[in-house]
Amino acid sequence: MTQAIFSKRGPSPPVKDIVTQVNLLKLLKRRGSVLKFARQNGEMQCGIVLFCNASHSTDHGQLGFVAGMLFGDLSLDSVFHTMSWSSHKSRRPVKSIGSAEILTSGEAIEEGKVLAKAYSKLLGFEIGLWIVFDSKDLYGTLSTCRNASDRSIRGDVSVIRFDFETKKIERMVWVPGKCNYGDPLTKTDSPMVDALQNLLYSGRISIDFEVALLN
């Protein structure tokens, strides 16, 4: 990408607030009567997509991701069916927000590989795996093939790089933090809360990522 805009990290949310926010999302997902699952006309590519995010203010970062099935490309009005999400404190201590973001990307990839394998068997054709993130550290580490500055996560970086090079991950997409659907699962003051709820209700991407990269 020719241009990258990195958002500022927000304050670390209290665990109680995060739990309440996640429970709200679970409630919305269970209410089939209020959720509108969009249908995509015609045949087109589909894949498992995970939006990853993290926050950090203590020794243990808050990790979160949203997983779903995307029909078409990662663009405005594409159909996206949310499948699962996760939000929790990291089991290992982390030294920086970059380390936390790499940990959550690693967890999301493992979840995504399981979902992609299961749906490939169910549907009878190969389902690709896309990872969407806003981490400056992960983008820089993977694009330059350099080691992570935090020695404790170098193994995690190696696994992510191996999965990408062996095509277990079809695409890794960097987006600005203000466009990351995983942001509300790690920050209570996230500007993406309404966008994520809209995604759950409508089943469609409401963000034009190409425009966001230029603004």
Image (spheres, rainbow, N blue to C red):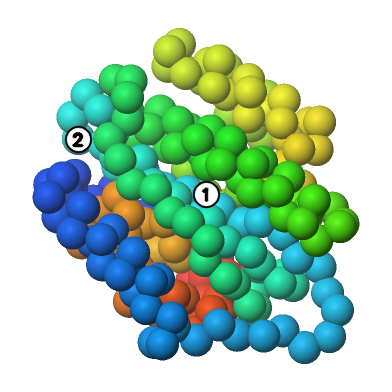
Q: Is residue 158 above or below residue 48?
A: above
Classify 10 Å Cα crowding around label 1: few (below 14), some (14-19), many (20 and above). Answer: many
Nearest to the observer: residue 210 or residue 62 = 62
Give me the residue at 16% from left, 45% from top: 15
Where disc 1 sits, the SS reads strand
Above or below, 84 against 113 in this view is below
x and y percentages locating residue 98 in the rendered image: 40, 33
Left or right: 117 in relation to 191 = right
- Displayed quadrant of residue 201: bottom left
**Three-letter code, disc 1:** Phe
Per the image, the residue denoted by label 1 is 133
Q: In which quadrant is the N terminus drawn?
A: bottom right
Dot 2 alpha-carbon crowd within 10 angstroms: few under 14, some 14 to 19, many 20 or more: some
Taking the image as shown, residue 96 lies to the left or right of residue 173, namely left
In the rendering, which numbered label is found on residue 57?
2
Residue at horizontal 58 percent and vertical 29 percent from the top = 141
In 3D space, how far apart are the residues under numbered discs 1 and 2 (Cα atoms)?
A: 19 Å
Query: Which residue sits at x=79%, y=52%?
Result: 120
- Residue 116: % across, % down: 70, 49
Could you tell me residue 114's position as x and y percent? 64, 41
The image shows residue 166, relative to residue 19, as above or below, that is above
